[in-house]
Image (spheres, rainbow, N blue to C red):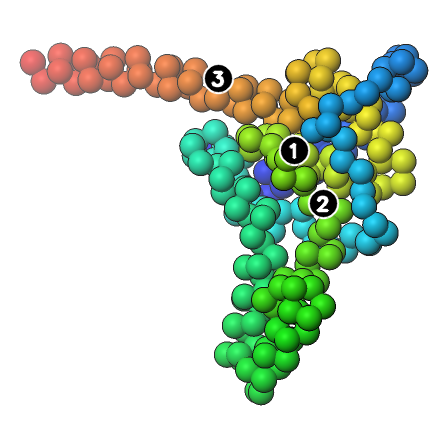
Amino acid sequence: MLNKTTTLVLLASLTAAQGIFASDVTKDLTSDALSSPRPSSSTMLVEGDEVLTSVGVFANLDDIQLDELVQVPDSFEILKNCDQNVNKNAGKRVKEFFEEKVPGGKMLARFAGFIGQKAFGTETFTEGALDSIRKPLKIDPKDYPTTSEALIGKKIQLLINLIPGGEKITAVTGKAGQVFFKTDTLTEGLLKALIKYFSKKSQESEAKIEPSTEKAVEADKSGSN
């Protein structure tokens, strides 16, 4: 079973792999490939000049393990809920912390809530601030993915787009994803391939264990006789 650290390292590696892959294959791709229209689901331009801070692509991502994406049927709903509601949940937790732990925190929380409603139209100031910070990573509802792999791929694509020249990288890797995996992003295709590989290995291991177990049972029966 993959642990949390391994999962995060894997996802980080996938991000880095896109940049490396792009630099390696750019020479082999024709100018037509780069200038050809990309599917709307892959075209996500960064809006505004917001600066991405240390806020993660997914909050609580370390609580999700790669093999859980295979084993849990509603893993997509977990990721989707995390992506769409993390700002609101974070705001509630900060508000609760101030109200319970900070002297005079209830008054501060009410004041911050008032500012949040006026400035951002949100229940808490924290939620509004996080909404502004994470705006470049927001996915258009009409283009929202329908699988865990696609959602992770889309988030990584938006993250790379924030890097100077990132849109050129995602253009190349997006084309590679379509060619090699028939997916909108290279990350999505790699994740699907990895999950398929681990699933196959798991099935092979189970197939090897079952005959061994049957032989052990037969040996016990013959020994008792």
* Residue at 65%, 33% in the rendered image: 143
Residue carrying label 3: 200
Where residue 123 sits, quadrant-wise, is: bottom right
Q: Which of the pair 189/37 is nearer the observer?
A: 37
Residue carrying label 2: 137
Residue 81 shows up from this direction:
yes
Most extreme residue toward the bottom is 104
Kindly state the secondary structure of the residue where label 2 is placed.
Answer: helix
| For discs 2 and 1, the disc positioned in front in the rendered view | 1
Q: CA distance from mark 2 to mark 1?
A: 13 Å
Q: Give the side of residue 45 with respect to residue 224, left or right.
A: right
* Residue at 44%, 36% in the rendered image: 74
- Mark closer to the chain start, 2 or 1: 2
Kindly state the secondary structure of the residue where label 1 is placed.
Answer: helix
Asked whether the beta carbons under mark 2 and mark 1 sit within 8 Å of each other, the answer is no
Kindly state the secondary structure of the residue where label 3 is placed.
Answer: helix
Residue type of the residue flagged with mark 1: Asp
70 shown above or below 209? below
Residue carrying label 1: 143
Q: Which of the pair 225/48 is nearer the observer?
A: 48
Q: CA distance from mark 3 to mark 1?
A: 31 Å
121 shown above or below 34? below
- Mark closer to the chain start, 3 or 1: 1
Asked whether the beta carbons under mark 3 and mark 1 sit within 8 Å of each other, the answer is no
Q: Residues within 10 Å of mark 1 (few under 14, many from 20)?
A: few
Horizontal and vertical percent position of residue 180: 70, 14
Residue type of the residue flagged with mark 3: Lys
* Residue at 43%, 15% in the rendered image: 204
Q: CA distance from mark 2 to mark 3?
A: 33 Å
* Residue at 63%, 80% in the rendered image: 111
| For discs 3 and 1, the disc positioned in front in the rendered view | 1
| For discs 2 and 3, the disc positioned in front in the rendered view | 2
